Protein backbone atom coordinates (compact mmCIF):
# COMPACT_ATOMS: atom_id res chain seq x y z
CA UNK A 1 0.00 0.00 0.00
CA UNK A 2 1.37 3.39 -0.97
CA UNK A 3 -0.46 5.60 1.52
CA UNK A 4 -3.19 5.54 4.14
CA UNK A 5 -6.64 5.86 2.57
CA UNK A 6 -7.93 7.46 5.76
CA UNK A 7 -5.42 10.26 6.48
CA UNK A 8 -3.12 10.24 3.43
CA UNK A 9 0.04 9.52 5.43
CA UNK A 10 2.70 7.69 3.42
CA UNK A 11 4.35 5.98 6.40
CA UNK A 12 2.87 2.52 6.78
CA UNK A 13 4.70 -0.14 8.75
CA UNK A 14 4.33 -3.89 8.90
CA UNK A 15 3.05 -5.12 12.23
CA UNK A 16 1.38 -8.04 13.97
CA UNK A 17 -1.83 -7.08 15.74
CA UNK A 18 -4.79 -8.52 17.58
CA UNK A 19 -7.87 -8.91 15.37
CA UNK A 20 -11.42 -9.40 16.64
CA UNK A 21 -13.72 -11.36 14.34
CA UNK A 22 -17.41 -11.14 15.17
CA UNK A 23 -20.21 -13.04 13.47
CA UNK A 24 -23.65 -12.49 14.99
CA UNK A 25 -23.21 -13.24 18.72
CA UNK A 26 -19.93 -15.17 18.39
CA UNK A 27 -16.50 -13.61 18.75
CA UNK A 28 -13.01 -14.89 18.03
CA UNK A 29 -9.85 -13.03 19.01
CA UNK A 30 -6.90 -13.73 16.73
CA UNK A 31 -3.42 -12.80 17.91
CA UNK A 32 -0.33 -11.96 15.84
CA UNK A 33 -2.21 -11.13 12.64
CA UNK A 34 0.04 -9.55 9.98
CA UNK A 35 -1.02 -6.20 8.58
CA UNK A 36 0.19 -2.74 7.65
CA UNK A 37 -0.49 0.05 10.14
CA UNK A 38 -0.49 3.79 9.43
CA UNK A 39 2.09 5.39 11.71
CA UNK A 40 0.01 8.60 11.93
CA UNK A 41 -3.63 7.53 12.50
CA UNK A 42 -3.29 3.82 13.29
CA UNK A 43 -5.55 2.61 10.45
CA UNK A 44 -4.93 -1.07 9.72
CA UNK A 45 -4.73 -2.76 6.32
CA UNK A 46 -5.06 -6.53 5.99
CA UNK A 47 -4.41 -8.68 2.93
CA UNK A 48 -7.47 -10.52 1.63
CA UNK A 49 -5.88 -13.95 2.15
CA UNK A 50 -5.26 -13.13 5.82
CA UNK A 51 -8.90 -12.22 6.41
CA UNK A 52 -10.10 -15.27 4.47
CA UNK A 53 -7.97 -17.54 6.68
CA UNK A 54 -9.39 -15.92 9.82
CA UNK A 55 -12.93 -16.47 8.53
CA UNK A 56 -12.17 -20.09 7.60
CA UNK A 57 -10.66 -20.76 11.04
CA UNK A 58 -13.67 -19.18 12.74
CA UNK A 59 -16.14 -21.49 10.99
CA UNK A 60 -13.94 -24.56 11.52
CA UNK A 61 -13.70 -23.82 15.25
CA UNK A 62 -17.45 -23.23 15.54
CA UNK A 63 -18.22 -26.47 13.72
CA UNK A 64 -15.83 -28.41 16.00
CA UNK A 65 -13.49 -29.30 13.12
CA UNK A 66 -10.65 -27.35 14.74
CA UNK A 67 -9.71 -26.57 18.34
CA UNK A 68 -8.86 -23.00 19.30
CA UNK A 69 -5.49 -22.22 20.89
CA UNK A 70 -7.27 -20.81 23.94
CA UNK A 71 -10.78 -20.10 25.25
CA UNK A 72 -11.74 -17.24 27.57
CA UNK A 73 -14.86 -15.88 29.16
CA UNK A 74 -15.75 -12.27 28.27
CA UNK A 75 -18.26 -10.19 30.23
CA UNK A 76 -20.71 -8.17 28.13
CA UNK A 77 -22.20 -4.90 29.34
CA UNK A 78 -24.60 -2.48 27.67
CA UNK A 79 -23.78 1.21 27.77
CA UNK A 80 -26.21 3.10 29.98
CA UNK A 81 -26.98 6.66 28.88
CA UNK A 82 -28.18 7.68 32.34
CA UNK A 83 -25.82 10.23 33.85
Image (spheres, rainbow, N blue to C red):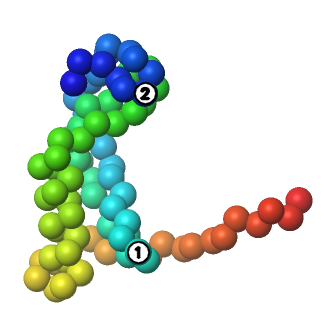
- Residue at 21% x, 64% y: name it: 55
Q: Is residue 7 visible?
A: yes
Residue lying farthest to the top in this orientation: 10
Q: Crowding at label 1, few (<14), some or many (≥20) Cα neighbours within 10 Å? A: few
Q: Quadrant of residue 63?
A: bottom left
What residue is pinned by disc 2?
Answer: 6
Residue 24 - label: 1
Whole-percent x and y of residue 75?
A: 54, 74
- Residue at 21% x, 24% y: name it: 1
Quadrant into which the C terminus falls: bottom right
Residue 37 - label: none
Label 1 or label 2, whichever comes before in sequence order: 2
| Viewer-closest of 71 and 52 | 52
Whole-percent x and y of residue 36?
A: 26, 31
Q: Crowding at label 2, few (<14), some or many (≥20) Cα neighbours within 10 Å? A: few
- Residue at 23% x, 48% y: name it: 32
| Viewer-closest of 71 and 62 | 62
Q: Is residue 69 visible?
A: no
Give left or right: position of 67 versus 72: left
Whole-percent x and y of residue 77?
A: 63, 71
Mark 2 residue element: loop
Residue lying farthest to the right in this orientation: 83
Amino acid sequence: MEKCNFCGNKNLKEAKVEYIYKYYNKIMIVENVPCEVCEFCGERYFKAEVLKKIEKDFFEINSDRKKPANVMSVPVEEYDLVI
